[in-house]
Amino acid sequence: MNEMPAAIRPETRALDTLIQQVIARTERAGGEGDRMVFLGNRHQSFPTAVIEDPVLEPVDKVIWMVIMLAARETGRDTAFPGYEVIGKRANVASRSTIARAIAILRATRWLTLCARVRRANGKFHGNLYALHDEPFPLVDALHLDAHYMTFLTQATGHGHARVRAVAQGVLDSIEEGVQAGEDVCRQEHVVERRLDSRADGSGRHPRRFFSFTARVIRQLYPNAGSGNQADTHHDQNSNAAPDRVQKLPAQKSNSSSSSKYINTTTTRKPSNIDLTGEDGQPLVYPKRLSDNQRTIAMRYLSQLSPDQRQPVLDELEGRFQAEGKGMKPVYDAISFLHALCKRVRKGDFQPNLGIGVCEARAQVVKPEPERLPLPPPPEETEERRQRRMAISQAEIAKMRTILGMRPSTSDQEVSEES
């Protein structure tokens, strides 16, 4: 007895149709070789670092993933997803929340603003961003993002408390490295950076995570790295830890939301450092230093006495000028400046190339003081005018006599009067 064939599922019929379409396209394309159809669910991989980032909140991580998907779908440069696209994919309804997350991603260097593009007529066209699979090194961010340090400084006054806390945390991490005598712009090996971002085996000590030092991470999240970080983040959604997290009042800006934010009351140094040289004179920086580099340089120079700052800058400028005479180029100005400041603190600094720079600046001709206008001459009287005319006529008559010229009637009148 023949068995009746089992009923064919609709999914199998759809699969058969798809296979037939693939066969037809293959026959039209020609060529040889096996082909394959992937029938599983479409998925993407995400870097572990973005999941383990102790500073980013879940909404920041999801928005980073949405931006990454937009770039990965094309495999090359593509349009930056708009707020509507990000909000739909990340299930975030608030535009201010998206703007806040993008600001935090830029501050933590997961996202870099590389350029502001303008059309030929000068009209603003848009921004060019670069998305990274781990926080970008500071030295590279200073090069690609020309206004990164200015952005951090301005972000400390942002309308959203969490943006202020994160931006200040990045600045504090930089300042901590400067105070410790480190070269914050040194080129780190990628493996070294990744190992430093890992917690130790015990899980009791907070870790350094790329942009942030251990102390700053403790300040932002006191229980980070305690071995029970999941419970810590869970507790942030309750009111059981008022000493660690508190809900701030709504800000008078468009960047408000209902998240919990960090209460940052620690006294910090001002972000803007106004330094002077000897006798209160303003410092003269090498023109080659960018705004980012100048901001970092100020932090290193603040550790020196006022009379030591300008000689260091002159030595750096002299080193730049020496490149035109065949000297090896300085590829990292901040690292060179850091080495000079280190020698000053050790007492080993001896001005060399900066001597000529200092002398050239001293020889600059100062503008002449503005001269006061001369007073107008006194008004001539009639008697003085007649006397001046008589003297002039007499001189003319003498010249005509010397030249053998016939005296004119006016000359005769002058002679008779004489």
Image (tube, rainbow, N blue to C red):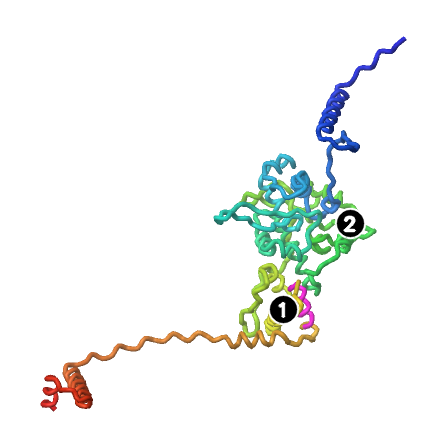
**Which SS type dominates the magenta stretch?**
helix
Look at the image and tell me in which quarter the C terminus lies. Answer: bottom left
- Left or right? Give the position of 205 relative to 238: right
Mark 1 surroundings within 10 Å by alpha-carbon count, few (fewer than 14), some (14 through 19), many (20 or more): few
Q: Is residue 246 above or below residue 325?
A: above
Image coordinates of residue 321 in percent, x first then y, are 60, 70
Q: Nearer the viewer, residue 118 or 138?
A: 118
Image coordinates of residue 280 in percent, x first then y, are 54, 72
- Left or right? Give the position of 341 relative to 3: left
Q: Quadrant of residue 37?
A: top right
In the image, which residues are magenta?
332-343
Q: Which residue sits furthest top? A: 1
In front of the other: label 1 or label 2? 1
Q: Are marks 1 and 2 in contact (CB under 8 Å)?
A: no
Q: Amino acid at mark 2?
A: Ser
Q: Which residue sits furthest front? A: 404
Q: Amino acid at mark 1?
A: Glu
| Residue 336 colored in magenta in the image | yes
| Residue 183 colored in magenta in the image | no
Describe the element under mark 1 as helix, strand or loop: helix
Question: Can the viewer see residue 23?
Answer: yes
What mark, if any, has residue 323 been given in the picture?
A: 1
Q: Quadrant of residue 381?
A: bottom left
Q: Is residue 222 above or below residue 365?
A: above
Image coordinates of residue 53 in percent, x first then y, are 72, 47
Residue underneath mark 2: 226
